[in-house]
Image (spheres, grey):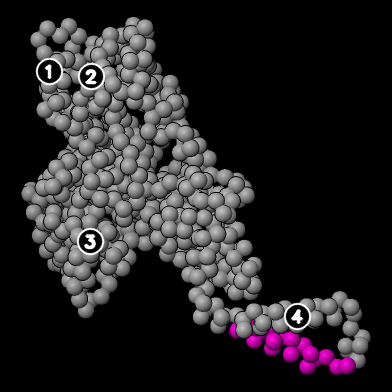
Amino acid sequence: AEAGPVATGPVAAEAIVAGLAALGVETVPVRIGADDTDRDRLATRITEALGEAGAPGGVVSLLALDEAPHPEHRDIPTGFATTLALLRALGDAGIDAPLWCVTRGAVSTGGADRLGAPAQALVWGLGGAVALEHPQRWGGLIDLPGSLDEGSLRALARALGGRGGGEQLAIRASGTLARRLRRAGAGRSGERWQPRGTVLITGGTGGVGAQIARGLADEGAEHMVLVSRRGPRAPGAAELEAELTERGARVTVAACDVADREALERLLDSVTGDGVDLPLTAVVHAAGALDDATVDALTPERIEAVLRPKVASARHLHELTRALDLDAFVLISSIAGTVGAAGQGNYAAASAYLDALAQRRRADGLPGTSVAWSAWAGGGMIDGEVADQLRRRGAPPIDGARALELLRQTVAHGDGFLVAADIDWGRFASALSATRPLPLLADLPEAGGTGQDPAGAEREEAGGAAALRTRLVELSPADRHTALVELVSEQAAAALGYADAGAVESGRAFKELGFDSLTAVDLRNRLNAATGLRLPVTLVFDYPTADDLAGLLREELLPSGEESADVDTAALAELDRVQSTLAALELDDIESATDDEMFELLDGMFELLGRDLTAS
């Protein structure tokens, strides 16, 4: 799939397609533009382009190279919007061939490797969500160097063939590198960022922003500008202002849509212009919004609702303050952008952008720090039941005071990007790698099993599914339903982090039990592994109780006609066994048989009769 308007620069879609073709890779180019938003029409185009060639061995998307704003949704790059359209169209066309998304300059492999395209990093965040929601349809991410030569194209061809050593790869002159998450190490100095002058905090009256403001006030911040869309009218804003004033800080609560560049420029002028006694020395971007939805349910509007306050605001802050002598430029990101989060593809994409922007600023000699957090305790966008679920899954909310201490150390240490999370990787990683290996975590020993052989895992899954089907065939309809309800309850309890399947009542709606997009996809993945089926990500919404879902599984595993055939086959086999036993017995054998032997024979006959009557 080629970008509509071909990306400018030394790497262009045509060059990549021509290079792959020269290496013997058979390609079927499909050009996708900003106006290709109708998924049905796009799916038809893809099917027609393939023609008699049939299902492809893989799909390569060069769409992310187009960073131009989408003509109808200016806060979304066209390449990101068309990548999403392609993902959904492939599903509609029934194509499960692995999709590889290609970027250029979206990641950095080290200090000398400048990250030049933060906008393309959005696709890296989205990819983590797709890998969890549609593991059979996902290949991975490949970042290209600034200029392509024959060696780079050969490396690309090898990676597309699954010989790159991972699913998040960067091709550079030195070779192909695979992305890994590693511990930062404990050997850090006690130096901390000391706030001074004026500190501007977006999302400053929200949960995380308010915690940061309190901590900085205690550390001597002289003046804080707390920015939110509602400003003084935001819930709790007046109380927070009074609290911070008591702690010794001067406080300005300002109403501003930071995603509105002109409005932000006016606000910055008011805190940096002539006559201002305390200069702006730091920016903390904590604003954001959640709108959970699976990839299939994402629309440009739902993407923009998340990207606008997170991504557009960060870009405007970056551009409008880059000439200022700042001590710190801090971006509050999420671990979702690093390891993926089912049902949060838009938020994961926004977080990946923030991480990339911080690295871009560091490469340009500007201050920049992005910390990818797990949930913060004590407020924020993730709290209540969701926080409880994360705790049960091995990712408890991090203490706010501890988080602030780590943030100040990270800024002072000069890290451009860091993941900060209080996670039990042994528990948390099992859900992430339930349906496919996750090489990203291969260097974390406690994550265990995330790099398993895909073929071996597939064989194990097939064996378990076959055993389940055989067991179901041997049960009566009532017992079969009970067994499937138990299976659903066990997997639902595991997805929610409960130790006991009894916590899941068979007639109670999944939504009432606390299921959201994240846990719904986890349950789908677990059931796929247990049954060998390919169930939709909307499973718990289409079949809202364990009883309902058990009915679906019975129909998928044993369709009515096939079920009858299996029952007949099993009944005939049982009849043959009983007849053989009777034929082998002489009359005196029967007369001399023990009570236990006779009861065993009669039990077999009654079981056979019961099956035969049920089948008829």
Three-letter amino acid code of the residue under disc 3: Arg
Q: Which residue is mark 2?
A: 254
**Dot 1 lies on which element?**
helix
Q: Residues within 10 Å of mark 2 (few under 14, many from 20)?
A: some
**Dot 3 lies on which element?**
helix
Q: Residues within 10 Å of mark 4 (few under 14, many from 20)?
A: few
Residue 106 shown left or right of residue 182 in the figure: left
The answer for how far apart the CA atoms under marks 3 and 1 are is: 45 Å
Query: Residue 217: percent from the left, percent from the top?
Result: 34, 12
Above or below 153: residue 325? above
Nearer-N-terminus badge (3/1): 3
The answer for how far apart the CA atoms under marks 2 and 1 are is: 13 Å
The answer for how far apart the CA atoms under marks 1 and 4 are is: 89 Å
Q: Is residue 564 visible?
A: yes
The magenta stretch is: 568-587
**Dot 4 lies on which element?**
helix
Determine if the magenta segment contains residue 342.
no
Nearer the observer: mark 3 or 1; the answer is: 3
Above or below 139: residue 603? below
Number of the label disc, if any, that sits on residue 606: 4
Q: Nearer the viewer, residue 470 or 408?
A: 470
Nearer-N-terminus badge (2/1): 2
Q: Which residue is mark 3?
A: 39
Three-letter amino acid code of the residue under disc 4: Phe
Determine if the magenta segment contains residue 569.
yes
Residue 16, image quadrant:
bottom left
Q: Which residue is mark 1?
A: 269
Question: Is there a contact, CB below 8 Å, between mark 3 and mark 1?
Answer: no
The answer for how far apart the CA atoms under marks 2 and 3 are is: 42 Å
Residue 411, image quadrant:
top left
Nearer-N-terminus badge (4/3): 3
- Residue at 32% of width from left, 19% of height from top? 237
